[in-house]
């Protein structure tokens, strides 16, 4: 539910909400849904509802107990802006982020429409990084909605990158993460798609992070792109 994670661009996860529903192409082989099935089989009490959206009230203020600063991926097993999550729960989760300036909170959504609706009710303290997932050209509009929110730092996660993204607008975007899909049903990622995004980020002076090539066994494919790793973070915040 919370603790260290192997996700390369963060340090730990915090899941006051679990469960989700698939809404776009990148959701087809959702890692969270796959992991949930495993946790259900292990009789983990947090997943007694399976992958149905579930709020864990006792975890909403958990980061207040963590004194050591860390980068925290919020709801790696869900989407904070899911339509089944009540407004007051979302706002309470953001209030916890506001109360913990020692941490950086990385919030990622595929539902920027709900983000736009709640934007004016959220206190966008500098330690909240707000991002959207864009897996192919079909979802470029998510970046437009992201730009309309008042987050002090905005990012895009092009993962799983399952198609070319050839006309991305990085205006007001501070960070671009790219990664291939992993797992037994992983869809291939063309190197030209990655290079296009890397070159665009470099031209626009946007921090670029290449997470992985992915594939059936992601450890074998690694995360080296053209002879080097790309581990850039936004320079707006001290890390």
Image (cartoon, rainbow, N blue to C red):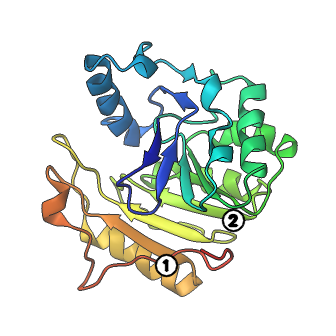
Q: Is residue 51 something that shows in the picture? A: no
Q: Which of 116 and 222 is in front in this view?
A: 222
Whether residue 22 is situated above or below residue 151 in the rendered picture = above
Q: Is residue 46 left or right of residue 34?
A: right
In the rendered structure, the answer to whether residue 18 lies left or right of residue 220 reads: right
Residue 114 at x, y = what percent?
Answer: 70, 36
Write down the residue under mark 1.
200
Label 1: few (<14), some (14–19) or many (≥20) C-alpha neighbours in 10 Å: some
Relative to 233, say whether 157 is above or below.
above
Locate residue 117: give its quadrant. Answer: top right
Front position in the image: 98 or 109: 98
* Residue 14, horizontal then vertical, whole percent: 54, 42
Q: Can you say which quadrant of the picture contains the C terminus?
A: bottom right
Task: Look at the image and tell me whether residue 158 can be seen.
Answer: yes
User: What x and y, as percent, mark residue 97?
Assistant: 72, 48
The residue that appears at 69% across and 61% down in the rendered structure is: 102
User: Does the residue at mark 1 contact the one at mark 2 (Cβ under 8 Å)?
Assistant: no
Quarter holding residue 24: top left
The residue depicted at 64 percent of the width and 35 percent of the height is: 81
Which disc, if any, is residue 153? Answer: 2
Q: In this view, does 91 lie above or below 145?
A: above
Work out whether mark 1 precedes mark 2 in sequence or the reverse, and give the earlier one: 2
Is 163 on the left or on the right of 41, as rendered? right
Front residue (pair 133, 74): 74
| Residue at image location 28% in from the left, 84% down from the top | 228
């Amino acid at each position: 539910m919370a603790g260290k994670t192997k996700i390369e661009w963060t340090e730990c996860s915090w899941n006051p909400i679990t469960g989700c529903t698939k809404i776009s192409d990148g959701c087809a082989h959702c890692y969270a849904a796959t992991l949930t099935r495993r946790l259900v089989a292990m009789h983990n009490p947090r997943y007694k509802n399976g992958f149905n959206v579930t709020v864990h009230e006792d975890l909403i203020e958990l980061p207040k107990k963590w004194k050591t600063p860390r980068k925290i991926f919020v709801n790696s097993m869900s989407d904070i802006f899911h339509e089944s999550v009540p407004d007051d729960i979302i706002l309470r989760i953001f209030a916890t982020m506001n109360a913990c300036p020692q941490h950086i909170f990385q919030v990622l959504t595929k539902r920027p429409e709900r983000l736009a609706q709640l934007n004016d009710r959220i206190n966008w303290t500098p330690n909240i990084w707000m991002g959207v997932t864009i897996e192919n050209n079909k979802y470029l509009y998510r970046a437009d909605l992201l730009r309309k929110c008042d987050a002090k730092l905005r990012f895009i996660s092009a993962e799983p990158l399952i198609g070319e993204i050839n006309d991305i607008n990085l205006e007001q975007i501070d960070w671009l993460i790219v990664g291939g899909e992993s797992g037994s049903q992983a869809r291939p990622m063309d190197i030209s798609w990655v290079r296009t995004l890397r070159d665009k980020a470099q031209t626009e002076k946007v921090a670029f992070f290449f997470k992985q090539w992915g594939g059936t066994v992601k450890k074998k494919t690694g995360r080296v792109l053209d002879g080097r790793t790309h581990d850039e973070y936004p320079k707006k915040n001290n890390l």
